[in-house]
Image (spheres, rainbow, N blue to C red):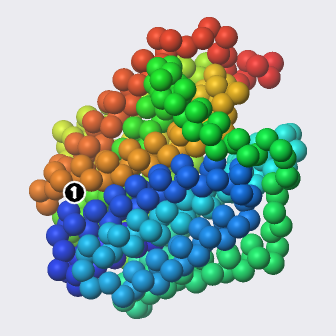
Amino acid sequence: MYLPALPAMGQQLQATQGQMQHTLGAFFAGFCVGMLLYGPLSDWLGRRKLLLSGMLLFVIASVLCTQVTQVEQLVALRALQAFGSGAAVVMARAIARDVYAPDELPRVLSLMTLVTMIAPLLAPLLGGALLTLFNWQAIFMLLALVGCINGVLVLWVLPETLQARAEHSGNILKAFHNYCLLVRDREAMGIIATLAFSFAGMFAFISGSPFVYISYFQVPAQYYGLLFGCNVIGMIAVLLLNVRMLKVYSLPRLLMIQSSAQVLFGLLLLLFNQQSLTVLVILIVLFMSLVNAIGTNSLSLLLQQRGQQAGSASALAISLQFGMGALASLAVSWLQDDTPFAMTLVMAVCAALGLLGQRMSVARLRPQVNSIGSKKQ
């Protein structure tokens, strides 16, 4: 939501483009750490109280963001804001597992995925609209208000969903032990690398695009959300196509096709990064459209192969997604030269590393992995 305001915020805080992009990197890093800690803790202490504590942190940090006078303060508060919001991502999935029957869970998780695709489309549009009516602080006040409303709904509507079980006392140690097992598993880490680096390429775009579109190509801030939204439309289209392709190709084969295509678009972006805005937008949409399909297929493959460690595997994969996103954002800020070069370079490198991870995992995949469609048949 605050992406369209980044240039204006940088001017008021007397910060460089690179310094403002650090606020994105700090958010992704805080998000990653928050998810890793909230996941095991929620299995031990329960969902509701930790969800409320995360929301409280989010609201406090959002309000304090409106009072900053230096970019360093904003970086620290964005990390705190992200740490609290990490509770929502982990708890939403954990609560869904607690409440819904196994045959209902895929439908519920699909709805959650749809929300996560629509939100990036609406948020920059809303942020741009607020920026035309108010100053950038209004964006963070709205975020605080949303956090308060969610907190009230949790208090009034949502009971504790985790049923007390004796084995919960050992869940934290078991979860962290599973993290160690997964990190040492080359096959699992290859799959996670495919997912994480493709995701990191997306966040290289998120970090660099406000300055590329608004500052370099002189796109009005209120139209930034429209260009951003083109990527979400592409993601939805490719995700729908992906469902059909799973009936024809195995997961490893489909992932190889998608990862290779993303590398191709990344290289084209790097070659034509300073061409017309139209060329750049088209190539970015093609690159970004593959991110969700690669992520969904990678996570499905990971859970097929590591079903007994599904909770830890999911937490590690999602956390590394945002961890790589943080590093990609930092890389864009470090390489920033006031042209699209830094953003497109990091996007291309991330796609190449994702393909490398896919090749590493395919070399070690078990032969029984089949496509979802063939299993149903």
Is 208 positioned to the left or the right of 156 in the image?
left
Q: Which residue is mark 1?
A: 333
Q: Which residue is at the far top?
A: 367
Residue at coordinates 59% horizontally, 23% vertically from top-left? 251
State which quadrant residue 64 falls in: bottom left
Q: Position of residue 302 (x, y in %)?
A: 59, 28
Residue at coordinates 64% horizontally, 44% vertically from top-left? 172
Quadrant assignment for the N terminus = bottom left
State which quadrant residue 171 falls in: top right
Is 155 positioned to the left or the right of 300 in the image?
right
Q: Is residue 157 above or below residue 90?
A: below
Q: Position of residue 311 (x, y in %)?
A: 66, 39
Residue at coordinates 83% horizontally, 67% vertically from top-left? 159
Whether residue 220 is visible = no
Q: Which residue is at the far left?
A: 337
Q: Position of residue 213 (x, y in %)?
A: 27, 63
Q: Position of residue 336 (x, y in %)?
A: 16, 56
Task: Decide which of 84, 293 is in the foreground and name it.
Answer: 84
Whether residue 302 is visible = yes
Q: Is residue 375 above or below residue 331?
A: above
